[in-house]
Image: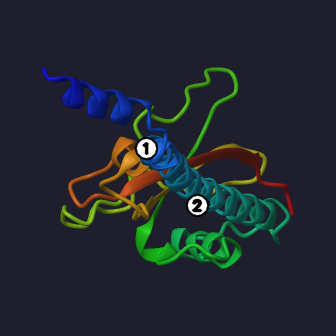
Amino acid sequence: MTRPGMNRLRRFLADEGGNATVEFVLVFPVFLALMIMSIELGFVTLRHTLLERGLDMAVREIRLGTGTAPEHDQIKRIICDNALMVRDCEQNLRLEMRPADLRAFSSLDTTPDCTDASEPSKPVRAFTPGQQNRLMLLRACLRFDPLFPDRLLGSALQTDATGQGAIVSMTAFVQEPI
């Protein structure tokens, strides 16, 4: 290489103009990804908290009710009315309730039965209205559409064939006597 070519190469390598641009190009995508994942996680947490609140309020109404056990649709309506900002709650919520024996306790199945828009509708799974002084297990499964389904956290969620994720909440209660 000739001397003028070496001088140009040396000056090019020593030039610090554009360092901030290179750093920005390398670091900004990481910060953007973290921000998108934070937003997605925030909405998942918000939905889960609202589902928990709706479930707690419904169970409170059942426990302190007038002795009549509400039916499936009434409990679903109470949960959805109290889970304030959950979209299409009644269409995407599936409930499962059954009595439990304290002496021979067995919990609900480990895999929740959630709604799946790609399958034909299923009948209500194991929903037995509560009786007085009986331990009842109630599980609610809510399907939701991730904000960014193909990116970052949205792609890491377990989804069904339609791309919906699931939030599951479970509680136990004893219905008070009249």
Look at mark 1 in the image and give the residue it sits on: 22
Q: Residues within 10 Å of mark 2 (few under 14, many from 20)?
A: some
Q: Give the quarter of the image for residue 75.
A: bottom right
Three-letter code for the amino acid on which mark 2 is drawn:
Phe
Q: Secondary structure at mark 1?
A: helix
Does any portion of residue 135 appear in the rendered image? yes
Residue type at mark 1 is Val
In the image, 75 versus 51, the foreground residue is 51
How far across and how far down the image is residue 152, in percent? 39, 46
Contact between marks 1 and 2 (CB within 8 A): the answer is no
Q: Position of residue 2 (x, y in %)?
A: 15, 23
Examine the image and state in which quarter residue 61 appears: bottom right
What residue occupies the far left of the structure in this picture?
1
Q: Position of residue 96 (x, y in %)?
A: 49, 52
Q: Tell me which numbered mark, 1 or 2, is placed earlier along the sequence.
A: 1
Q: Quadrant of residue 91?
A: bottom left
**Does residue 74 appear to the left or right of 113 in the view shown?**
right
Residue at the spot 81% in from the left edge and 69% down from the top edge: 65
Label 2: element kind: helix
Residue at 56 percent of width and 55 percent of height: 44
| 12 shown above or below 59 | above
C-alpha distance separating marks 1 and 2: 33 Å
Question: Height in image: 2 above or below 66?
Answer: above
Residue bearing the label numbered 2: 43
- Residue 59: image location, x then y, percent: 74, 59
Q: Residue at x 73, y 61 (%)?
A: 53
